[in-house]
Amino acid sequence: MPAASRRLRPLQLHARLTHSSPSSDTTHFGFQNVPRHKKEDMVKSVFSSVASSYDVMNDAMSLGVHRLWKHDFVSTLNPGASGPSKCIDLAGGTGDIALRILDHAREKHYDRETTVDIVDLNPDMLKEGQKRFKQTMYHNTPQVAFHLANAQALPPAQFPSNNYDLYTIAFGIRNCTDIPAVLREAHRVLKPGGTFACLEFSRVDNSLLSTLYDSYSFSIIPLMGSIIAADRDSYQYLVESIRRFPSQPDFSEMIREAGFTTGAPREGKGGAWRNLWGGVAAIHAGVKL
């Protein structure tokens, strides 16, 4: 674990730290500002540390609710409804979203031709996904492939422009050093008419719920990390990274700046995003015209 991640922050620092801004040469790593060129390796270290316990911790931290969110996310996208889709899932190491995409296409639309390229920056997370897929009917089929690559700069030879129908990223974009670069790459690799979809922790819109959520996040989740994964620091970072992520309106504007068309800049039906559990998480979507 990098030295910069070995720290515990009291809850009362949250309000002040979430409003501090990095310089052009630095970026956020949780509540710390760190040199931009170091963040990628620091994030890799965090996810190498948590890879083997990642899914167990997700269940423990969310009491299983993350499964409902992911089901909602994939069901809303409805892969396979218009015929076989070529999909790419970024930060998808453990294969959770990809498996849901393939299962949905097969179970709802009798589609065994939809494909998913799973892309992750971390080889340890990809190994966990490969283990998972060995237990499925999709193992050793053309429907799934694993790739080690950076979402900010996908190699064009491997990931050509105008190539995918659907781009998904779930609970991963907040860990990227350059979010606008990720969005630009998403726009590049999608076909005209293709959909960008992001599921990410976000800003709670109710003051009482926000207070309870903060207390749970900063007190209980790092403790769970210590007990279940023997790694408090990594889960402290993950909690802090959520608070650093842009608000729903700000992130939806970033999506539009990358060239996507979205719904109206508001929450709900016809809006650019949809809150889950009052904004604990949110689904954002955009279309490449």
Image: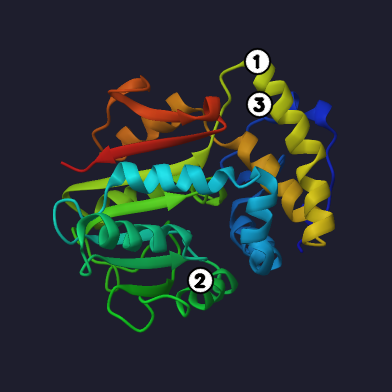
Q: Earlier in the sequence, mark 3 or mark 1?
A: 3
Q: Quadrant of residue 50?
A: bottom right
State how far apart marks 2 and 3 are (Cα).
Answer: 36 Å
Dot 2 falls on a residue whose secondary structure is helix
Local packing at callout 1 (Cα closer than 10 Å; few below 14, some 14-19, many 20+) is few
Position of the N terminus by quadrant: bottom right
Q: Earlier in the sequence, mark 2 or mark 1?
A: 2
Res. 57 in view? yes
Q: Position of residue 84 (x, y in %)?
A: 17, 62
Q: Residue at x 35, y 84 (%)?
A: 140
Q: Give the camera-side residue of 35 and 103.
A: 103
Q: Which mark is residue 129?
A: 2
Which residue lies under the disc numbered 1?
207
Q: Position of residue 141 (x, y in %)?
A: 30, 81
Q: Residue at x 49, y 77 (%)?
A: 130
Which residue lies under the disc numbered 3?
19
